[in-house]
Image (cartoon, rainbow, N blue to C red):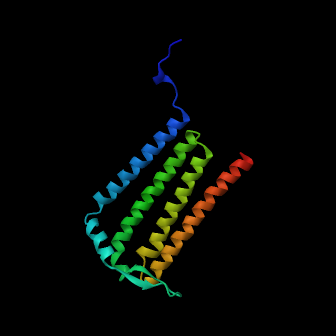
C-alpha cells in the first residue's frame, strides 16, 4: 500500500523541534517589538553601561559594577520589564502548546522553570529597579535574581520528581 507521507502525523521529535523553532522566532519578535516601541533604547543602553562604577556590596568588602545613579535608568528598567513580561507570556503559551501536544514531562518542566524565572524576574525588576532609590537596592535585585534562578531550578526538579513518582 502506497501512502502519502505528508498525511502522516508529525513525530513527537518533529513536534518538539517545531515548538522550539516557533519559540525562538517569537523571542526575536518580542525583542524587535521592544526596540520598535521604545525609541532611543540604544542610547539608554549606552548611557547605562557608561554609568557603571564599582560599588561596595553592603556588608562586604566586595566591589561589583553598579550604576552610579541607579534611578537615572528607570526608562531602561521599564523596557527590561516589558521584555521579561513578553517572555513570560510566551512561556505560558508554550506550556499550553506542550500540554496539548503531550510533550515529554522534561519539556513541560523546562517550560515551567522558564516561566518561574521570567515572571519572577519581571516582579524583581518592577520591585527593585523601576522603584529604585538607593544603590543598595541594585544589589538586592541581583540577589533576588539568584534566588529566582534557584527557585526555578527546584521547581523543575520537583515537577520531574513528582511525575516519576505519580505519573
Residue at the top extreme of this rendering: 1
Residue at the right extreme of this rendering: 165
24 on left or right of 50: right
- Residue drawn at point x = 47 percent, y = 45 percent: 20
- Residue drawn at point x = 49 percent, y = 68 percent: 123
Quarter the C terminus occupies = top right
Vertical placement of 22 versus 125: above or below?
above
Quarter the N terminus occupies = top right
- Residue drawn at point x = 59 percent, y = 39 percent: 102
Q: Position of residue 42 (x, y in %)?
A: 27, 66
Q: Position of residue 136 (x, y in %)?
A: 47, 83
Vertical placement of 78 versus 60: above or below?
above
- Residue drawn at point x = 49 percent, y = 84 percent: 62
**Number of on-image labels:** 0
Q: Position of residue 83 (x, y in %)?
A: 40, 60
Q: Quadrant of residue 68?
A: bottom left
Residue 134 visible in the snapshot? no
157 on left or right of 124: right
Residue 144 visible in the snapshot? yes
28 on left or right of 112: left
Q: Position of residue 49 (x, y in %)?
A: 33, 74
- Residue in the foreground of this view, choosing between 65 and 105: 65
Vertical placement of 149 versus 27: above or below?
below
Amino acid at each position: 500500500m502506497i501512502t502519502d507521507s505528508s498525511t502522516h502525523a508529525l513525530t513527537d521529535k518533529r513536534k518538539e523541534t517545531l515548538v522550539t523553532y516557533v519559540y525562538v522566532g517569537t523571542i526575536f519578535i518580542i525583542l524587535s517589538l521592544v526596540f520598535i516601541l521604545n525609541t532611543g533604547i540604544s542610547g539608554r543602553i549606552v548611557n547605562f553601561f557608561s554609568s557603571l562604577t564599582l560599588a561596595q556590596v553592603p556588608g562586604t568588602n566586595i566591589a561589583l559594577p553598579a550604576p552610579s545613579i541607579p534611578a537615572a535608568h528607570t526608562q531602561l528598567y521599564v523596557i527590561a520589564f516589558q521584555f521579561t513580561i513578553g517572555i513570560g507570556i510566551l512561556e505560558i503559551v508554550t506550556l499550553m502548546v506542550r500540554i496539548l501536544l503531550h510533550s515529554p514531562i522534561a519539556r513541560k518542566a523546562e517550560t515551567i522553570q522558564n516561566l518561574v524565572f521570567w515572571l519572577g524576574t519581571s516582579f524583581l525588576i518592577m520591585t527593585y529597579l523601576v522603584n529604585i532609590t538607593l544603590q543598595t537596592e541594585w544589589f538586592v535585585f541581583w540577589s533576588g535574581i539568584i534566588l529566582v534562578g534557584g527557585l526555578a531550578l527546584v521547581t523543575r526538579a520537583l515537577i520531574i520528581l513528582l511525575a516519576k513518582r505519580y505519573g
